[in-house]
Amino acid sequence: MPARSQLETAFMPLPGSAPVEWRIEPGLVAYPDALAFMEARAEDIRSGAAGETVWLVEHPPLYTAGTSARAQDLIEPDRFPVFAAGRGGEYTYHGPGQRVAYVMLDLKRRREDVRAFVAALESWIIETLAMFNVRGERREDRVGVWVVRPDRPPLADGTPAEDKIAAIGIRLRKWVSFHGIAINVEPDLSHFGGIVPCGIQDHGVTSLVDLGLPVTMSDLDVALKASFEQVFGPAAPIYRPMLRTG
């Protein structure tokens, strides 16, 4: 599929808007704490009490269920805690070694277009991966970002083998977004075995380290910020932390 141009996927704010707050949380953040924070921050953004925010976190091992999750796709329900996320999509794994970026933007200050917003998130991921010479690709019938695996045999129908390297799941409330994206840096890929990730059975899951790249979380964070500004506009200097984690 041809790549969309940067112009097609740019999601810039109105002129004069403040830079997006950019925050990195140390340690592992409990999922209920993340949900509570996002809910409150989204409301504050809508009311004007807070600015747009991107929040980078890692979670302890857990599964989340989106609004389209099917019970049969939770293969090992007792393996890790399972949380109803309230976002779109199906089952997703989060855990150490995976960078989760929660994206809280006011689309009224940008574009009131959900499909364009998802395309912009995909472009953000693709531009980030390109900084490590990884070709991430979008698929019309599958949300997220994928990499072709020429090192593996094709599928039975001749389709090239490919793995998912990044997931997307969002929710909008009064045109303020929350939830966001997850990119696999070096998670334990066996942990994905307790679910059918995003309801897709014919493809696997990979990570930057699994692809043979010695990328650290800090390396990814630098790339995420640089590519975010290409797609979404200026971000403020990094601030940490937002929560007190035990």
Image: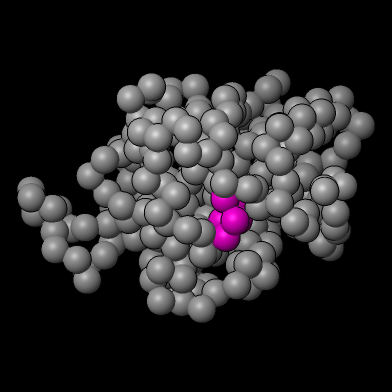
Viewer-proximal residue among 143 and 15: 143
Q: Is residue 193 left or right of residue 27?
A: left
- In this picture, is 101 found above or below 87? below
140 magenta-colored: no
Count the marks.
Answer: 0
Residue 154 % position (x, y): 13, 59
Residue 205, by quadrant, is: bottom left
Q: Is residue 138 visible?
A: yes
Q: Is residue 145 left or right of residue 171?
A: left
Residue extending furthest toward the front: 78
Q: How is the image coloured?
A: one colour
Q: Residue at horizontal 67%, vertical 37%?
A: 31
Q: Residue at horizontal 27%, vertical 57%?
A: 162
Residue 66 % position (x, y): 50, 27
98 magenta-colored: yes
Residue 57 % position (x, y): 69, 51
* Boundaries of the magenta span: 95-100
Residue extending furthest toward the right: 49
Q: Residue at horizontal 51%, vertical 59%?
A: 187
- In this picture, is 59 found above or below 113? below
Viewer-proximal residue among 36 and 75: 75
Q: Residue at horizontal 14%, vertical 63%?
A: 153
Q: Is residue 101 visible?
A: no
Residue 190 % position (x, y): 40, 54
Viewer-proximal residue among 133 and 161: 161
Residue 105, by quadrant, is: top right
Residue extending furthest toward the left: 157
Viewer-proximal residue among 176 and 149: 149
Q: Is residue 156 left or right of residue 28?
A: left
Residue 174, by quadrant, is: top right
- In this picture, is 197 found above or below 131? above
